[in-house]
Image (cartoon, coloured by chain):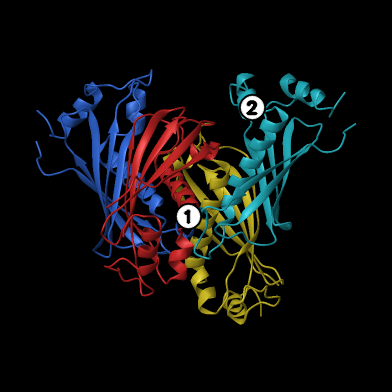
Chain colours: A red, B yellow, C blue, D cyan
Amino acid sequence: MSKSALKSTIKLKVRFHECDPLQIVWHGNYFKYFEEGREEFSKKHGISYLDAKKNGFATPIVKTSCEHKFPLKYGDEFEVETTFINSEAAKIIFHYKIFNSGKLICTGETIQVFTDNNSELVLNNPSFFLDWKKKMGLIK
Amino acid sequence: MSKSALKSTIKLKVRFHECDPLQIVWHGNYFKYFEEGREEFSKKHGISYLDAKKNGFATPIVKTSCEHKFPLKYGDEFEVETTFINSEAAKIIFHYKIFNSGKLICTGETIQVFTDNNSELVLNNPSFFLDWKKKMGLIK
Amino acid sequence: MSKSALKSTIKLKVRFHECDPLQIVWHGNYFKYFEEGREEFSKKHGISYLDAKKNGFATPIVKTSCEHKFPLKYGDEFEVETTFINSEAAKIIFHYKIFNSGKLICTGETIQVFTDNNSELVLNNPSFFLDWKKKMGLIK
Amino acid sequence: MSKSALKSTIKLKVRFHECDPLQIVWHGNYFKYFEEGREEFSKKHGISYLDAKKNGFATPIVKTSCEHKFPLKYGDEFEVETTFINSEAAKIIFHYKIFNSGKLICTGETIQVFTDNNSELVLNNPSFFLDWKKKMGLIK
């Protein structure tokens, strides 16, 4: 069913205040980079947090993870590759890879769900999300 | 008019992720400490951001400053002394002093204003704020 | 000597600047809470990042994850329960549970490794770490 | 002596995690934007934190301030204009202006000093800094 994966890439640079006393990016800050990756993906592929909001949904994150291979340091320029993982569940799953000059720095994942105006979990995919998937060729 | 200054003190500890590659607290993070000082003051003296909200007001910060004498390092235990500066203007002014074992680390200031439900600046002191000032003996 | 898991608990409070426009703690900030949990554990059980440093090691984080059940909001008081997971590998593994008034908010994990003064991965448990484990009754 | 002011401009975008429950950028985060402005200035005009380090100096911030006119919101694209303020003292002074579509959002200032390898304050301008000033036509 699913075609080749939808992806986006964004170039970022490590800022001074993101580094810790070990002279490397503090581990929790990678989730900021993933967020930027997600936003770039949304912009490129026409879906966003504000779209969800317009349709009455929030998309809170229910799971995050990050596996580190190498550290990033102050001034490093790197790429965040964000891949949409197509799932039948009412979830938005992204995988992330961060590269520094071609070297894999870390991999990560976020899982988001849909909640309605009463902050209740939505168990079926909202129609605006299914429409987007169709447009992208991810479902028929 | 004003009696002796209203103050509060809170003890905090420098956390690892608040420090930068120079092994000291990153300068912008002092405004987090001031925020904790402000919250401790509000708790102790019975006024808070949520009180303002209940009365239809937000209290955005319009001015911040910080002057550094000495750095704080990872693990340092320090005190934030927060002083309310009584002013006739419709403003909430706090001064801050951070001490590490009695040594003055930095001083700071924040100025907040009142905005109404339409995010418009409120030029006169809201009655809930005047009531609080009276209760505290800051005005008659 | 003691079998049952080594644990610590620390009480914290959600600060304003840790919350996002959805009025909840931004997901990446939970790793700050885990860090505070880890520090409390280290203090209570006599092992710390500074101990490692004194012995010539850094303990970079190589894996983090967090699974969210419920959000935390501004002003919420909560507990971080940190549990040391005993492993034969040269790793420091912690599991975390955050509770708000007894309700499980999220669970998480961090895995740290040891690197030497040349930032090289250390494959065997450093002796200062084995000594600590013995003292804690985790190994014989 | 001084010619027209040395400036730089960088375009940035407000990220989700930089916003607070009032739906606006949290006030302490403007110092991150100023830091990016400073780095862009350094890159454009050939002087940087790493230059200072290479010459045995650190350049800790001793004063920061920010005055807010309007808030920034999630997704806003804005410009940070960084201006070097030429001073005879052994200080690095920058003024900042943030604009959103031509509207002045805030102004700010940072003051840095030089410290040597012993973290002692340096009272005279280091020669690498004077060389840079000469090259820039700020002094003869």
Viewport quadrant of the N terminus of chain C = top left
Have a look at marks 2 and 1 and say if they share a chain.
no
Q: Is residue C76 visible from the viewing direction of this image?
A: no
Q: Is residue D55 visible from the viewing direction of this image?
A: yes
Viewport quadrant of the C terminus of chain C = top left
Q: Secondary structure at mark 2?
A: loop
- The residue singled out by tag 1 in the image is B10
User: What's the chain of the residue with tag 2?
Assistant: D
Q: Residue at x 58, y 45 (%)?
A: D32
Q: Amino acid at mark 2?
A: Thr
Q: Amino acid at mark 1?
A: Ile
Q: Check the image and report above or below for C3 versus C60.
A: below
Q: Judge from the rendering whether residue C41 lies leftward or rightward of residue A96; answer left or right.
A: left
Q: Which numbered marker is on residue D115?
A: 2
Could you say where residue A124 lies in the image, as x and y percent from the top left? 28, 68
**Mark 2 against mark 1, which lies toward the viewer?**
2
Q: Residue at x 50, y 49 (%)?
A: B79
Label 2 crowd (10 A; few <14 / some 14-19 / many >=20): some
Could you say where residue A69 lies in the image, as x and y percent from the top left? 34, 30
Q: Judge from the rendering whether residue C66 lies leftward or rightward of residue C75; answer left or right.
A: left
Q: Judge from the rendering whether residue C138 lies leftward or rightward of residue D118; answer left or right.
A: left
Q: Check the image and report above or below for C31 versus D27.
A: above
Label 2 vs label 1: CA separation?
30 Å
Could you say where residue B14 lies in the image, as x and y percent from the top left? 45, 43
User: What's the chain of the residue with tag 1?
Assistant: B
